[in-house]
Image (spheres, helix red, strand yellow):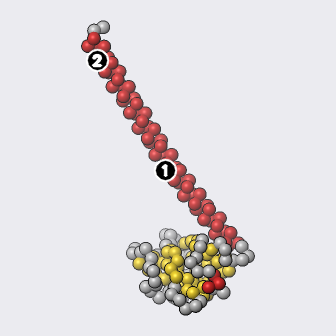
Amino acid sequence: MGRSRRAIVFSLYSAANERKLRDQVAELQQQTAAQQAEREKLEQQLLVAKTQAYEAMIWSDPKSIKIMLRPKDPKMPQLEAMWHPEMGLCIRGWNVPNPGEKRMLQLWLIPKKGGKPMPSMTLWPDATGKFSEVVEHPQEAMSETQALAITEEPMGGSPQPTSTPMWVGGVT
């Protein structure tokens, strides 16, 4: 076999080998992406399970105090919260109307000593109007809080309420 013929065969072999390696690399990249997506899905499921377990502990512990948040509008549903002095606060609602595309709900802690309302978390009901959220470490202690209030605020929340509370519940 002549030198040029060997060079052609070697080139063909190299090109075929390179294609095979590229295909293998592409397949491995696809597998990696699929495994990463599965990992992210499992991490999200774990976070949901941990949150649900934490909520269950707050709702079932006898140290927790139940707070009913009554609506300003009698056509709106009542919300409920459970506050544990060490674990935090869990608030949930059903059939809560969507506040609109550029609005969201925000929880406020109203202090006993007449200070400004303390902003807490923002809330967004799902498509059925349901939400359940946990505040693990509220800014104010339960003993220093007079009431919980929920207002409708601009997307992202607000440092101070910009609307009249839609729900209010006294902390006892």
Assign a secondary structure to mark 2.
helix
Q: Which residue is mark 2?
A: 8
Q: Is residue 14 left or right of residue 33?
A: left
Residue in the picture at 28% in, 9% down = 2
Q: In front here: 145 or 99?
A: 145
Q: What's the CA distance linking mark 1 and mark 2?
A: 43 Å
In this view of the protein, can residue 120 be seen by the observer? yes
Labels 1 and 2: the sequence-earlier one: 2
In this view of the protein, can residue 90 be seen by the observer? no
Residue in the picture at 54% in, 58% down = 44
Q: Which residue is most to the left? A: 4
Q: Position of residue 28 (x, y in %)?
A: 45, 38
Q: Which residue is mark 1?
A: 37
Q: Alpha-carbon neighbours of circle 1 within 10 Å: few (<14), some, or many (≥20)?
A: few
Q: Which residue is most to the right? A: 62
Q: Position of residue 123 (x, y in %)?
A: 50, 74
| 51, above or below 59, in the image | above
Q: Position of residue 71 (x, y in %)?
A: 54, 86
| 13, above or below 87, in the image | above
The number of numbered badges drawn on the structure is 2
Q: In front here: 96 or 169?
A: 169
The quadrant of the image that shows the C terminus is bottom right
Circles 1, 2 touching at the beta carbon (< 8 Å): no
Label 2 is placed on what type of residue?
A: Ile
Q: Position of residue 12 (x, y in %)?
A: 32, 21
Assign a secondary structure to mark 1.
helix
Label 1 is placed on what type of residue?
A: Ala
Residue in the picture at 63% in, 81% down = 142
Residue in the picture at 65% in, 84% down = 143
The quadrant of the image that shows the N terminus is top left
Q: Alpha-carbon neighbours of circle 2 within 10 Å: few (<14), some, or many (≥20)?
A: few
Q: Which residue is most to the bottom? A: 114
